[in-house]
Image (cartoon, rainbow, N blue to C red):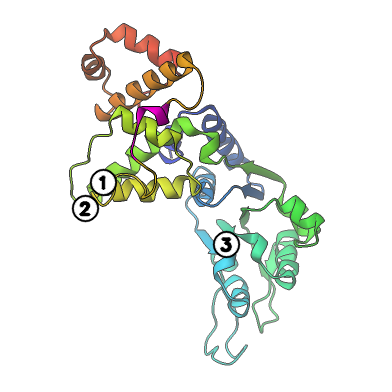
Amino acid sequence: MEKNEIEHRLLGHSEVMQGIRQSVLQLAQLDVDLIINGATGTGKEVVAHCLHDFSSRAKKPFVALNCGALSESMIESELFGHEAGAFTGAQKRRIGKLEYANGGTIFLDEVESMPPHFQVRLLRVVQERCLERLGGNELIHLDVRVIAASKLNLRQAADAGDFREDLYYRLNVTNIELPSMAQRKEDVGLLFRHFAELAAQKYNLPCPTLHTLQLQALQTREWHGNVREISNEAERWALGLTFFAPGSGDIQPSNLLSKGGLGEQMDEFEKGLIETTLLQNHGHLERTAKALNIPRKKLYLRMRKHQLSRP
């Protein structure tokens, strides 16, 4: 997979996202277990997929398991598998997620919700790279990379006794901290437009034009659901079901000038206008310069000033 592909999967012009992309490419080659920390909706599974796809394990399975979505009675069978007759209803052998991921990557989302006694069994797998199916005695050797994800600080959870400290150290060979949208507001417009275009293609509809005033309103909004919330709002907007979220209020210029001085606001306005026009013209610089009624050289200089690249 070509390395420039990561820019289309982990979107963002912000400095923090440039750092995330660089870290993902580096860690993909190291083949170590790690933890991805980030609030809900920040894209933990997308990052895990990239770590797998840009690694030497790319041609082997990527298996995702949401530990918080399974009941305690199901998680053992899902993770470790079982032999026929291991429990009532187990009529045949079942391969668990860990075994199925052999040679590839297992992604354990919401690992903090895993019950303590299963954390003990997972610790053994991480340490020894082998497992026994439920109801079985055979040791099955594994070659698997473990990527865990959590919306909590697992170091603090371990200190509080809510997560096994030895498992934390085994998983936390290294980690990736994903930023919230509050830490990368300059990426909001790019993400919103991207998801709106995907929705328009999905439903075979023309994608509405995102005007500069709308872009500024989007950037001043608090996105508590992070990228997932932006994706949802962009799809609704592309379908004509809503402008922005109900209750967000009308877009008024006074709402857009609440932060920073005049110079800062002018820079943000110019940056947003150039970014939006670039998106509308699919990164074509001549058409963008013509739409903005400025020389192409001046467009280059403005893009360099605002650290913008062609989408």
Measuring 48% from the left and 17% from the top, which residue is drawn there?
264
**Looking at the rendering, which quadrant does residue 130 occupy?**
bottom right
Question: Label 1 amino acid?
Answer: Ala
Which of discs 1 and 2 lies nearer the camera? The answer is 1
Which quarter of the rendered picture does the C terminus lie within?
top left
Measuring 54% from the left and 79% from the top, which residue is drawn there?
94
Is residue 293 in view? yes
Closer to the camera in the image, 185 or 43: 185
Tell whether label 1 touches label 3 (CB within 8 Å).
no
Measuring 68% from the left and 75% from the top, which residue is drawn there?
132
Magenta region includes residue 130? no
Across and down, in percent, residue 77 comes to 59, 77
- The magenta segment: 250-256
Q: How far apart are marks 3 and 2 (CA)?
A: 37 Å
Question: Label 3 amino acid?
Answer: Asn
- 102 vs 246, left or right, is right
| Circle 2 SS class | loop
**Which residue position is annotated with label 2?**
203
Label 1: how many residues lie within 10 Å, few (<14), some (14-19) or many (20+)? many
| Circle 3 SS class | loop
- 40 vs 231, left or right, is right
Across and down, in percent, residue 75 comes to 60, 74
Across and down, in percent, residue 210 comes to 28, 34
**Which residue position is annotated with label 1?**
238
Using the image, tell me which numbered label, if any, was put on residue 102.
3
Using the image, tell me which numbered label, if any, was put on residue 228.
none
